[in-house]
Image: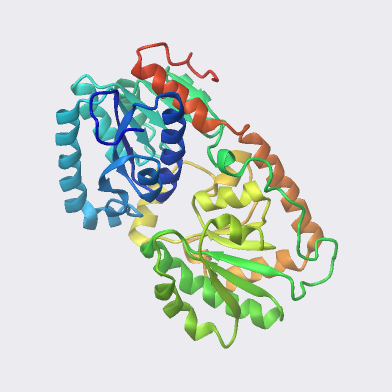
Amino acid sequence: MKTQDLTGKQVMIIAGETSGDHHGARLVAEMAKKEPDLHVCGIGGPQMQAAGVEILVDAGQLSVVGITEVFSALPVVLREAGRVKREMLRRMPDLLILIDFPDFNLHMAGFAKKHGIKVFYYISPQIWAWRRSRVKKIKRRVDHMAVILPFEADFYRTWQVPVTFVGHPLLDHYGQKHWQEPANNSGQESAPEAATVVGLLAGSRKSEIRRNLPVMLAAAGRLAEDLPGVEFIVSVAPGIDPLWLEDWIQPWRDRIDMKLQSGEIAGVLEQCTLVVAASGTVTLEAAIFGVPMVIMYRISNLSYMLGKMLVKVDHIGLANIIAGQRVVPELIQQDANPGTIARTVRDLLSDRSALLALRRRLKTVRAMLGEPGASEKAANIALSLIYRKTAATPAGRV
């Protein structure tokens, strides 16, 4: 893919989260296979840069969690939004691709449409969960939606938004090979022994980790007392300095058998009997691997109170949302405390039949995500929009 020659087709892409960076990179790679002369620029991270995207703004500057936390980052967000708008007008891309990151991206969609630039939204904002009125903006500003959760196509079809369910891009990365039978004492009904491994997945941003990891470590301390021999892995997300995490876990090392592990989350999940995970994409990755989990969710109290008034879903974990029922435990805000987390994990680890039943339910969730190929299908839609062909029939499949 060309990164400097601006004579070919131009695409701008905006992904403001770590997961969006991964999905954007795979999408761009698929587009490049079909259109090698494409030039892509925009907002993203190291994965998109490695895929050949000219990074105008590092997505890490824009990533925040929680309603109230947005305000502290507002000056940076406004500054970079202005920069991207100026680049959009200078380059006049043939297509703007947006990946999740709704408030920023819907604003950019409106700006693009005002200037006659076509807009493709890949990976829907979770407007079915809260602020559903945003679908009206999407209908006016977006030429086509590509959704990755099975129920989203019906939602957009109700609003007559052109939409295609392409499957989940995580399956492009993991395929079918990673589903495996339990590795740790899977056939035993007794309490866990030395091979039992619990993963602690505190998040991908420092703000999340500060809020979640101390609680997880305190819960791990209790579990280590109740279930001698249990081992713990603390996952180190991309962009997080392991030495910074070491400062958090060092006080616990004399009480907990624990290690840090960097690299892809797959390397952690393949070792784990169960994980305690901050709510987010990682919980869906755990479901794809068939790893039982306890989901926790902690934000500022003000953000939580505002969220309770705005959010209209029965579950926060993606596996539970997709299943339409509580498949895995969720511990939210005050319930996400060391005692409750430890008790919930201990109960699951001590009942191997329940643990295996949970793995079977997660396998059903994985099947609902469709087949691998989301990135290629989304690339086909994007390129068809660039060349002014019909993208796809509403709520169809490609």
Residue 7: image location, x then y, percent: 23, 24
Vertical relation: 239 (above or below) 195? above
Count of marks, rendered view: 0
Quick check: 218 left or right of 53? right
Q: Which residue is nearer to you in this view: 284 or 380? A: 380
Q: Which residue is nearer to you in this view: 264 or 338? A: 264
Residue located at (68% from left, 41% from top): 176
- The answer to whether residue 131 is seen in the rendering is yes
Quick check: 199 left or right of 141? right
Q: Residue placed farthest to the top in the image? A: 389
Quick check: 355 left or right of 161? right
Vertical relation: 189 (above or below) 126? below
- The answer to whether residue 68 is seen in the rendering is no
* Rendering quarter of residue 253: bottom right
Residue 9: image location, x then y, percent: 29, 23
* Rendering quarter of residue 233: bottom right
Residue located at (70% from left, 40% from top): 364
Q: Residue placed farthest to the bottom in the image? A: 254
Q: Could you tell me which quadrant the N terminus lies in?
A: top left
